Image (cartoon, helix red, strand yellow):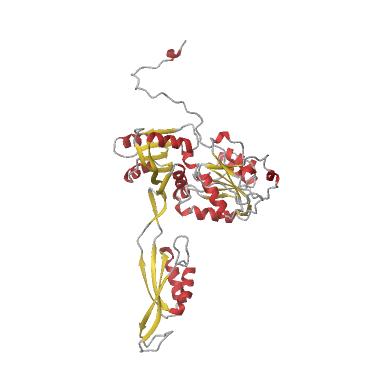
Amino acid sequence: MTTARREPAESHPTPGRADRHVMTSRAQLAHLQSGPVALPAHEGAHSDPLATVRELPLPGAPLSEVVAALDARYDPALAESWDAVGLVCGDPAEAVHSVLFAVDPTDAVVDEAIEAGVDLVVTHHPLLLTPVHGVPADDPKGRIVHRLIRAGIGLFVAHTNADRAADHGVNDALASALGVANAVPLESVAAPLTDTLVVFAPVEEGDRLVDALSAAGAGVIGDYTRCAWQTTGTGTFIPGNETNPAIGTHGTLERVPETRLEMVVPRAARAEVLRALHEWHPYEDPGYAVFENSSTPTRAGLGRVGELTHPITLREFAERAAAVLPATAAGVRVAGDPDRVIRTVALCGGSGGSLIDTARAAGADVFLTSDLKHHPVVDAGEVSGPALVEVAHYATEYPWLPVAADVLYRDLGARVEVTVSRRRTDPWTMHVSQQVAEVPAPGVYAASDTAD
């Protein structure tokens, strides 16, 4: 399996099994290229003598496991409070052998899913973003739900949580497509609040206590678990007359080899961790202290800002965006001097108008996003700040699809086929260009002006 540069979506035929991750004797590890503008292609199928080898179905995974893998990459906690993410329909116990990724859950995408025989559709945009009281089959949204259920196809949504996700989210995929390096969030999400627990215990009890505290939620740093720091020293104490000491006797100074143990504790898990500490610590009254840590930014957040490998003009940057993003009727619009030199790029997939000032504060030379309104663009042009580049909403989010598909394929151990939709769901169908010239003198248009 090789990769080919993606052409405009309408130029591709309906994908078949050759467009998915498939397991054959020739290429068991072949899968979607993680570059956001490359899709898999199957070349020379008739000339390849191994092309006649029967493709064996991948073993698949329960829908619940697929959902867990998606949630691990696109944490639902990152979603806006108004958003509707997660599993829309589907039986968590059913097996999933193939997954289709698309931007929008439209009838055309459902047609594609049914034709391809997939078991799950993952979309970026929600089907039921606004609350509904029912999904009757004669309602446009309800019709999609009924069609999916009748076909045995599940639907999963990763929306604003995928926008904010670190490393493999919508904005990192867009940055990669545009050649923006060392990208960091424009608006970072703070890490969950944490504490540091310091506890003293007999040396021989150190590992057992670490196990117990870890089971209660302590010691997690990123993707690492059971994280702890230990050093040894001498603990001293005198048991009182009313105590029941595990070590020592009443009224006698004791010197005990002890471990000083430190672990990070999510603040939300503080009570549970302290309960485990009192349950598993051998001392009647364990010595410990809890320190509240300051909040720190994470790699998750809205938008991205980074650097180009070499400076180019605004015109060249806009041409690059037009070349690497899906072609749409709206094309690429630019507000700024075409000859301006661009080094620092800010971007936001989807509607990012609220981040114009943030991009300015980040020192960006250009800010690329979608759905910009007239007045903010005019205001931005009146002050020192980034040039603005606007592309279609759909076009900024499409690069995430092959990235998310590739990540899921690898996270599930190549047990599930993945496909990227070839249906262009950008709603605009036509654009009439106009010659940019001087503003015409005021006049009155009349029907007679067009008469023969």
Residue at position x 53%, y 53% in the image:
70
Q: Nearer the viewer, residue 182 or 328?
A: 182
Q: Is residue 206 above or below residue 152?
A: below
Q: Is residue 96 above or below residue 430?
A: below
Disc count in the image? 0
Q: Nearer the viewer, residue 110 or 386?
A: 386
Q: Is residue 128 visible?
A: no
Q: Position of residue 313 (x, y in %)?
A: 37, 36
- Which residue lies most toward the left here? 383
Q: Position of residue 4 (x, y in %)?
A: 56, 40
Which quadrant holds the N terminus? top right
Q: Quadrant of residue 240?
A: bottom left
Q: Nearer the viewer, residue 186 or 341?
A: 341
Q: Quadrant of residue 178?
A: top left
Q: Position of residue 309 (x, y in %)?
A: 40, 44
Q: Is residue 276 visible?
A: yes
Left or right of residue 68, residue 186 in this image? left
Q: Is residue 207 above or below residue 320?
A: below
Q: Nearer the viewer, residue 133 or 179?
A: 179
Left or right of residue 199, residue 141 in this image? right
Q: Position of residue 190 (x, y in %)?
A: 39, 55
